[in-house]
Image (cartoon, coloured by chain):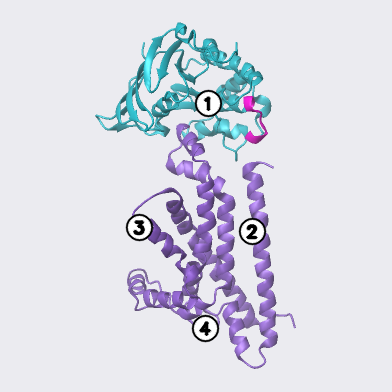
Amino acid sequence: MTVLAVDVEKDLGAVRLAVRFQAAGGATALFGPSGAGKTSAVNMIAGLLKPDRGAITLDDTVLFDAAKKIDVPPHLRRIGYVFQEGRLFPHMSVRQNLDYGRRMSGQPRDTKEFDRIVALLDIGHLLERRPRMLSGGERQRVAVGRALLMQPRLLLLDEPLASLDVAHKREILPYLVRLRDEAGIPIVYVSHTAAELRRIATTVVRLDAGRVVGAGGLELLDGVDVDGLA
Amino acid sequence: MLKLSPDEWIAVELSLRVALVATAWALPFGLAIGWLLARTNFWGKSVLDGLVHLPLVLPPVVTGYLLLISFGRRGPVGAFLYDHFGIVFSFRWTGAALSCGVMGFPLMIRPIRLALEAIDRRLEDAAGTLGANHVLVFLTVTLPLALPGVIAGVVLCFARALGEFGATITFVSNIPGETQTISAAIYTLTQVPGGDAAAMRLVLLSVVLSFAALFASEWLGRRAIVRFHGE
């Protein structure tokens, strides 16, 4: 069953992006070298970057359709986005960061869900801290929790481990695997590291120079490994 | 010798009222125009930028005169405001507040604009993906992160308003109890024989008020930084 359907074009100056792929449940990897257009593609799904042409649908909702002039603004898309650099709000505590999505969308407090996510990511002892007092791995776990707690229909993870050293990558990977298996939210996972994706991905979309050059299973990751992580 | 006379108290109270009202009115405009200058590009932006900063470079007496011919009872803006809202500026303390606000405005705009320009826009994008609309993004992310700059702008505007002289006296004259602020009172006292002691009292008071404003800004700014960026 297709959950997410992307068919977009965008002139990015250096590269012309023409990306077309579908994603079902589980974790779909957007895999490719730097500059392939992976981040631009997820920014378009999130609504942070406007395609020149094409359409994006999530479940039954049209998020973007250039022909029909539909462009749902980011705050109404309910798509959780974990950025490469976390982007936690520096002026809020971890707890306030986690609560932000719920507060902004006016949902009632759900203590059980909050506790469940906090336990899943093991961040209970960090709740009263400020983001700058966290390690890189802790910061990314909080960023994942913040995106999950807005109850997203889709979760975008853009190189969530790229800014971490190998030890922290090893620390956070098991949480992401648990997330994929337990949260029940479809995931689009951007990375240029095959070893990382082998642990996470269930399907793979390979990008190169703004185009999809392959879509299928984990075998697409073979022969292109760059750094030894597994 | 250091005890203020009732008339002098009136001047002090009036000065504080004028400066507070001027700053309070300037703030929403300062945020709006600071945001426009920091975040948007539009035709005529450099004209707006220049217009806002004009009171900083014009002789204050010129600013005051321009206010008089536009906001006076017979001026185009002044006549309109009087006819439709019954608002009078000329020779009233409200006029003093207007001229002080205009004179303080460029000093308020600059730190607000710089603070808004320094904010990491990607945090605002993140807030958007978390369900915050533009207004909520501004209130919960942009404004708190810009707060040290906003406080600096408020204090600078207040200090400028407290000391304003040239534009105010040109626009609304020097009427005791209505438009005679501390500065105007000092000026008057230095023009009459035997006014030296009273002038000196008000001078000392000015120094104290200015210092207090500076310390308050320093303290508030530091508190805001600790509160919003962690110790």
Q: Position of residue A86 (x, y in %)?
A: 56, 30
Taking the view exactly as shown, the residue that stands out farthest to the left is A67
**Could you tell me which chain the residue with mark 1 belongs to?**
A
Q: Position of residue A43 (x, y in %)?
A: 42, 29
Q: What secondary structure is marked by label 3?
A: loop
Q: Label the magenta part by its dominant secondary structure.
A: helix
Question: How far apart in space, not on screen, are marks 2 and 3 (Cα)?
Answer: 33 Å
Q: What secondary structure is marked by label 2?
A: helix
Which kind of residue does numbered mark 1 sit on?
Leu
Image height of A193 relative to B134, above or below = above
The residue at which mark 2 appears reads as B217
Region rendered in magenta: A131-138
The residue at which mark 3 appears reads as B44
CB within 8 Å, label 1 to label 3: no
- Chain in purple on the image: B
Label ID, residue B175: 4
Number of other residues with Cα within 10 Å of mark 1, as a class: few under 14, some 14 to 19, many 20 or more:
many
Question: How far apart in space, not on screen, are marks 1 and 2 (Cα)?
Answer: 38 Å
Occupied quadrant, residue A4: top left
Asked if badges 2 and 3 are on one and the same chain, I answer yes
Among the two numbered marks 3 and 4 on one chain, the one whose residue lies closer to the N terminus: 3
The residue at which mark 1 appears reads as A149
**Could you tell me which chain the residue with mark 3 belongs to?**
B
Mark 4 or 2: in front is 2
